[in-house]
Amino acid sequence: MQKGDSLRTFNEAVAIVTGGASGIGRALSEDLARRGAHVVIADRQIALAKEVAEGINTGWGTANALELDVTDFAATERVVQDTVQTHGRLDYIFNNAGLAVAGEVGLYQPDDWQRVLDVNLQGVVNGVQAAYSVMLKQGYGHIVNTASMAGLCPLPMGVSYAATKHAVVGLSTSLRIEAAEAGVRVSVFCPGFIRTQIMYGGGKYGKDLMQVSSETQEKMVQRTNPMEPADFALHALNAVARNKAIIIVPARWKLFWWLNRLSPSFVLWLSRRMYKSTKQMLEGTTPDTRKEGAQQAS
């Protein structure tokens, strides 16, 4: 490690991406490699992580895969230390691994809360704790945490997810102020709807309490007009390069954030309407069919 060296954006940088084998993490890993970074793909799905790394290595960049459960701090620290020992530096850590429990809180068990807290919040904390000390010694580095629009606005039927993502936003914006004194950058991703497995029952390690048909699930996904992960990565990494604090992609979701800041009561009202509409879809009806049924009954 050379104190006095500087952050590389992104050519010849070294980046760790947790949850890097699929979804947003995979897209970030592939785009980082295209930009010239060496990427460490850290994921519980080690076979898939190796497949992604192999694709990068035979295609357009350099990467390696390491197995990681982000809820294990010792394991997270080993990934960071092994990366620094191998490459002599750590420019970026993307604390991206996440999951969701889909459904109303009335359906939760205590373990459902713990499942989300362990990965979405403690997993980010572990990544920060492991990487921040390294970056302080270097005098440079960039920590990028993945939150969500659910970290800025309400998300009924995803309450535990929203709770953790609000916490990640608070962690990131607060640490950004402290870290700047030492030359370390901190940013937070707040994606809108991105077409990843987390939209389908909470992801591979998540949980679906709603028990809806695949057809209904696909309808629910389509109505959100989700962005493809590769498009997200392109715009999000451009914002990381500009050292943006809160990175909202797609950009149209900034309007929802601004509305929430200007009129929280209006966004609560709007969210209630969306919640009721979703419940009607889950029950197999829509506002239109309900209205038609009422007219026929009269």
Image: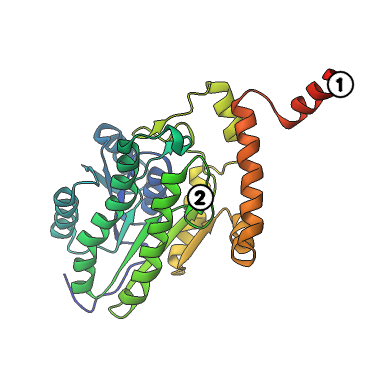
Q: Nearer the viewer, residue 91 or 265?
A: 265
Of callouts 1 and 2, the N-terminal one: 2
Secondary structure at badge 1 equals loop
Report the residue marked by disc 1: 298
Instruction: Tell me if 13 is positioned left or right of 250 in this view.
Output: left
Residue at position x 53%, y 58% from top?
248
Residue 191 bears which disc, if any? none
Instruction: Tell me if 194 is positioned left or right of 2 in this view.
Output: right
- Residue 223 drawn at (x, y percent): 64, 36
Gap between marks 1 and 2 measured at Cα: 49 Å
Seen in the picture, residue 207 relative to 125 is either above or below; the reply is above
Secondary structure at badge 2 equals helix
Q: Nearer the viewer, residue 291 or 155?
A: 291
Q: Quadrant of the C terminus?
A: top right
Instruction: Tell me if 69 is positioned left or right of 236 in this view.
Output: left
The amino acid type, in three-letter code, at marker 1 is Ser
Q: Is residue 99 visible?
A: yes
Report the residue marked by disc 2: 232
Report the residue that reaches farthest toward the front: 298
The scheme the figure's colours follow is: rainbow
- Residue 35 drawn at (x, y percent): 40, 56
Seen in the picture, residue 155 relative to 203 is either above or below; the reply is below
The amino acid type, in three-letter code, at marker 2 is Phe
Image quarter for residue 216? top right
Residue at position x 20%, y 59% from top?
130
Q: Quadrant of the N terminus?
A: bottom left
- Residue neighbourhood size for the residue with mark 1, other residues' Cα within 10 Å, grouped as few (<14), some (14–19), many (≥20): few
Residue at position x 34%, y 42% from top?
113
